[in-house]
Amino acid sequence: MSDAPTTATPPDVVDADYRLDAPGEIMSWLRELLRSQSRVQLITPDGEAIHTVLRALDTPHGMLSFEAPVDRQSLAPVLASDELVATAFLDRIKLQFDLATLVSVRGDGAEVLRAPIPLRLYRFQRRQAYRVQSQGQLFPALRLQDPDLPRLRVLNVSAGGIALQWPADVLPVPRAGEAIRGVLELEREVSFSAVLRAQHVTDGLEGAPHQIGCAFSAMTPSAARALQLFIDQAQKRERLLRRD
């Protein structure tokens, strides 16, 4: 199993509950993102990332303007990349969209980052997102960075995060907010590196493993697509079973 992020092309048909193609709907969510001034993460396929906020919507020219970060060192690889994924959270909603040709522009004494308005946007319900329940003991699982540590069983997977079975007698239990790094193995041939953030801990009874709810903190575009494809396929299998 390779540690490198899995390269997966996006599916031809993505569940309509997630994908938005209508320009009016896309603009409505972008206006909400502008109004809320929520933090936006821009990440490259290599995992380089910056955090910013949306500053303006130039609808006549079809452009977005983001605030330029002070740290020029972190900005350089983001500007150099020809593929970026933007993610942001609005309460229970996660927004995700691709950005192309991000450029730095200086005007009125301030630097901004400009990119074309996306043609497609994905919207996920953070707490009501479809969860893929684990059907076996081998997959899905999380392989931690330390090769001497055991693989952790993943109880369920959603677009926003995973639930881990955590053996408290083997590993120190992470605190809320603590980062967990490893390789998420969804299936035998599908795995990618991920950074998770522990959200909540449910203690196991009488020495049973704890349950750790984790949110995805950093993920490459190819990993995000592989995850979405995995979830889409699980939903389709469930629909077929219900139909049968």
Image (tube, grey):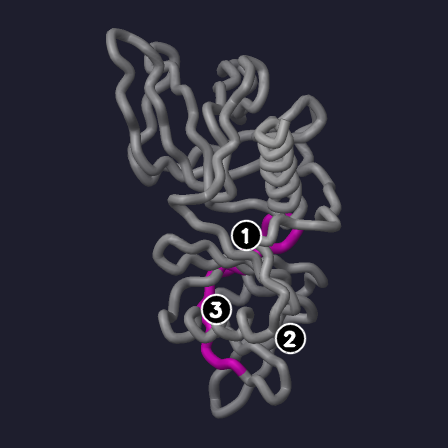
Q: Would you say residue 78 is visible in this rendering?
A: no
Residue for point 38% across, 14% down? 167
Q: Looking at this view, is 125 or 216 the one in front?
A: 125
Residue 56 seen in the figure:
yes
Label 1 neighbour load within 10 Å: few <14, some 14-19, many 20+: few
**Mark 1 or 3, closer to the camera:** 1
Helix, strand or loop for disc 1: loop
Residue tagged by mark 3? 29
Magenta residues?
Answer: 41-57
Marks 1 and 3 close (CB-CB < 8 Å): no
Q: Of the residues shown, which amino acid type is indicated by label 3?
A: Trp
**What's the mark number on residue 116?**
2
Residue 200 point in image, percent of width and height: 30, 34
Please rate how many residues cluster around mark 2, counting C-alpha atoms within 10 Å: few if below 14, some from 14 to 19, many from 20.
Answer: some
Q: What residue type is labelled 2?
A: Pro
Q: Does the magenta stretch include residue 110?
A: no
Q: Distance between the residues labelled 2 and 3?
A: 15 Å
Point out the residue furthest to the front here: 244
Residue that carries the numbered disc 1 in the rendered image: 17
Residue type at tag 1: Asp
Give the spatial CA distance, label 1 vs label 3.
15 Å
Asked whether, in this view, residue 52 is left or right of residue 113, the answer is left
* Circle nearer the N terminus (1, 3): 1
